[in-house]
Image (spheres, grey):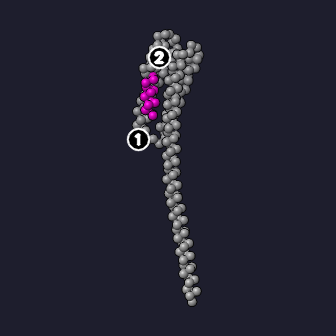
Amino acid sequence: MVALNHKPKTTRLLFVGYLAIAVFFAALWINDARLFEDQLQVVQSSDLSAKKMLAVADLIEIARTRTRVSHQIFLVDDVFERDELFQQLGILASEFIAKSERFKSMALSEKELATYDRLRTHIPSVVASIRQIGELAFMETDEANQQARLIIVRELIPTQEKIIDGFV
């Protein structure tokens, strides 16, 4: 009789043991799933931040290249080279606008959006300065060169530096 009584206790203990192990594994699985979701959110957030930083770096590089090309226009004597450099300025302006719009389409915070909108107000003056510089570059007079250099130093560079500093 003792043996018969002992058998149901053993079966019950095994059942409770298996049930406890199953509950333990289920709890681990639920915890791992929650941790995985948290890690996924961190990775996605980091990925978005990295993409934003890359976009800002591209915008800064384009702004600096435009300033360099603006200077370079007056260092070449050949009219065709000047025209090529002026066309390069147009291409860089198009790239800046496209990358700027792509940056704006990212999930920006309120602060980032306000900064973007504030910096965007400087773009028309940069475009106007570059257009003026291009017109002066093709006049091929010392007075026009001097006036263009003043525009570069007094208007273009400070405005583009404001844009660059604003993104940083």
Question: Could you tell me which secondary element the residue under label 2 belongs to?
Answer: helix
Q: Is residue 62 above or below residue 70?
A: below
Q: Which mark is residue 141?
A: none
Does 15 appear in magenta?
Answer: no
x 43%, y 38%: residue = 112
Question: Could you tell me which secondary element the residue under label 1 belongs to?
Answer: helix
Give 168 or 90, whichever is nearer the viewer: 168
Q: Which residue is labeled 2 in the image? A: 149
| Secondary structure mainly formed by the magenta segment | helix
Q: Position of residue 26 (x, y in %)?
A: 53, 65
**Pointer 2: residues within 10 angstroms few (<14), some, or many (20+)?**
some
The amino acid type found where label 2 is placed reads: Arg
Q: Is residue 25 above or below residue 163?
A: below
Residue lying at the far front of the rendered structure: 2
Which quadrant is the N terminus positioned in?
bottom right
Give 64 or 132, whichever is nearer the viewer: 64
Using the rendered view, name the quadrant where residue 87 is placed: top right
Q: Which residue is labeled 1 in the image? A: 110
Q: Earlier in the sequence, mark 2 or mark 1?
A: 1
- What's the magenta region? 156-168
Residue 97 visible from this viewpoint: no
x 43%, y 25%: residue = 159
Q: Is residue 70 above or below residue 53?
A: above
x 49%, y 10%: residue = 142
Q: Tell which tag, 2 or 1, sits nearer the viewer.
A: 2
Q: Position of residue 42 (x, y in %)?
A: 49, 49
Q: CA distance from mark 2 to mark 1?
A: 38 Å
The answer to the question of whether label 2 and label 1 lie on touching residues, with beta carbons closer than 8 A, is: no
Residue 13 visible from this viewpoint: yes
In the rendered view, does 46 fall on the left or right side of 118? Answer: right
